[in-house]
Image (cartoon, rainbow, N blue to C red):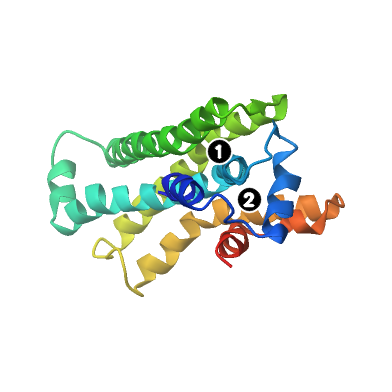
Amino acid sequence: MLFLGLLGATAVSPEILTETTREALAAQAEQYFTGTASDTALLLSMVIIQGPYFVAMIGAVLAILVTQTGVGQRMAAGELELLLSGPYREREVFVALIAGSFVLSLLMIGVLVVISFGGATIVIQWIGIALTSEAFVLLTAGFLTPIPMALWATFLAIVVYFGFPDTPVNGTEPGNLIIIIGVLPAVLRRIKEKASRFNAGMNPTVLYSNQELLVGCFN
């Protein structure tokens, strides 16, 4: 949605970026791409540069939702007791639930990664922008970063639903508060990345968050 929104916005209004926003985006884009002079190129570059962190956070949320739908509801309906009454040990059931939910989460994350990174990369190549070696490292991170985040979120959600099988998707029950921890590693990784750039003495304009950049696009 972000990719399509940015592409559509720049197609309709080519001069949509303010000067401050353009400088912030250009400072980031020049590390990974060459020829990002247009506003469209800068915005699509942002999708690829910032994408790994947002895909990791969205992937963790997707893993929790998949677990809630596929496991939480079945536990609340008493289907877990049926599994345990069969020729299965508790450990086998636990591992199977994690593996099944994790695989489904990876499939959903894979679709998200292909649409976001693949779509942006294809358009960037089509408009004549070259990728540097750092850009390929960034794309690799975009594919790999969500995997451990989704696994952790899946594991935590399974543990929560074993203890609180009636936990809904939204609410203030203990289970919901614990599940929030499943997204924290992805959020903390984003904060750490920002801090490392600041400590390295990077231009402060680069440290604008994506929210600030997007707000600046429409000022």
Identified at 44% across, 46% down, the residue is 59
Of label 1 and label 2, which has the lower sequence position? 1
Say what secondary structure mark 1 lies in: loop
Could one spot residue 155 in this view of the protein?
Answer: no
- The residue depicted at 13 percent of the width and 37 percent of the height is 86
Mark 1 and mark 2 in contact? Answer it, CB < 8 Å: yes
Q: Is residue 115 left or right of residue 135?
A: left
Rendered location of residue 8, percent (x, y): 43, 48
Q: Is residue 49 visible?
A: yes
Q: Is residue 18 left or right of residue 106?
A: right
Question: In the displayed structure, does residue 169 sit left or right of residue 77?
Answer: right
Find residue 189 and name its label.
2
Which residue, as the protein is rendered here, is positioned at the far bottom?
172
Which residue was labeled with disc 1?
Answer: 145
Q: Please tell me which residue is depicted at 14% across the width and 49% down the height of the picture.
A: 79
Q: Between residue 119 and residue 219, name the one nearer to us.
A: 219
Between residue 174 and residue 110, name the one nearer to us: 110
Q: Amino acid at mark 1?
A: Thr
Could you tell me which secondary element the residue under label 2 belongs to? helix
Q: Quadrant of the C terminus?
A: bottom right
**Taking 13 as reference, is 101 above or below it?**
above
- Measuring from the top left, give residue 209's x and y in whole percent: 64, 59
Badge 1, how many Cα within 10 Å: few under 14, some, many 20+?
some
Q: Nearer the viewer, residue 166 or 119?
A: 119
**Which residue is at the front of the view, 129 or 158?**
129
In-image side of 197 versus 39 (left or right): right
Type of amino acid under label 2: Arg
Please identify the quarter of the rendering in which residue 89 is found: top left
Q: Quadrant of residue 95?
A: top left
The percent coordinates of residue 56 (x first, y second) are 51, 45
